[in-house]
Amino acid sequence: MHFRITTLVENAVAQSGQALLAEHGLSFYIEAGDRKILFDTGQNLAISNNARVLGIDLNQIDTVVLSHGHYDHSGGLQSVLASNKDFTLYGHPDVFSPKVKITNGNYKYIGIPVEKNDIVNCGISLKLDRNPVEIAPGVMTSGEIALENDFEDAEPMFFLKKDETVTPDTLADDQALILDTDNGVVVLLGCSHRGVINTLTHVARLKGNPKIHAILGGLHLGKASDGKLAKIIEHLRSFDLEMVGVGHCTGPRAFLALSNEFKDRVFLNTVGKVIQF
């Protein structure tokens, strides 16, 4: 099946001469046959502007998939809902959990800035499932991803807050989007909070160990140690990826390490980038 993927929100803009905006966030616009899908929505500063500049009509979106419940992937729901109340929203059952980040004793709410009930009251079809779900021909959510190795886990500053009780957030709601393209499997990543290797291992098992052609998205390696980066690269070699498009939370050190290893198969993803498979 043919897919056209446009990066609608990213941390950087590379194209000059266009009024595109960057923000700390991520959103992919996916055209799959007659389906128009958003994987994540950014944090809401850039999505409407970039959609207009790129000729994307948010009113035509029929499906939104959330990789996880952090604001920089879900805040743009506000803009989508302002123009479109006729789409299906997919996510993990924990995606609306009250998420906070604690730094030096300071609490910051980093969850979805739209109430679940408000979304439902708009008439949106809400489908939350921890299992893989086929949302369109050749398009599937990964479902919940197990923590299988000893070098990938959620960062210790993420928590869930209910009333006055705070518990560590292992980001069980983190999931990927899987595309069955003519070139092989393509995996779209939000932040890879459950680990890119755990994610690809899960996808390979789920799909019967097919060729994974490409990954695109955030790898959340900005604060990774040299040892962790080395292990990530060692395990990535075994997947023999043809394309590694990274950005958002990947981090410059990780991008450089990936580029040194995988050469021209690696690129920095930016707003406005269009890839066809």
Image (tube, rainbow, N blue to C red):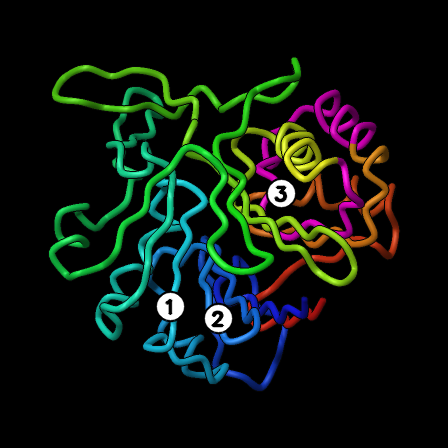
**For the residue marked with disc 2, what is the amino acid?**
Arg
The image quadrant that residue 172 belongs to is top left
Magenta-drawn stretch contains 42: no
Residue on which the image places disc 2: 35
Which residues fall within the magenta stretch? 209-235
Q: At 24% from the left edge and 66% from the top edge, which residue is drawn?
A: 81
Q: Amino acid at mark 3?
A: Gly
Estimate how packed mark 3 is, as few (under 14), some (14 to 19) or many (20 or more) residues with alpha carbons within 10 Å: some
Q: Position of residue 214 (x, y in %)?
A: 74, 52
Q: Write the residue at 30% across / 15% down.
A: 167
Q: Please state which of the two labelled residues, at mark 3 or mark 1, is closer to the viewer.
A: 1
Q: Is residue 215 magenta?
A: yes
Q: Earlier in the sequence, mark 2 or mark 3?
A: 2
Q: In the rendered view of the protein, which quadrant contains the N terminus? A: bottom right
Return the disc, 3 or 1, that comes first in the chain's sequence. Answer: 1
Q: Against 3, is 100 above or below?
A: above
Q: Which residue is mark 3?
A: 251
Q: Which residue is mark 1?
A: 62
- Asked if marks 2 and 1 touch (Cβ < 8 Å), the reply is yes
Q: Residues within 10 Å of mark 1 (few under 14, many from 20)?
A: some
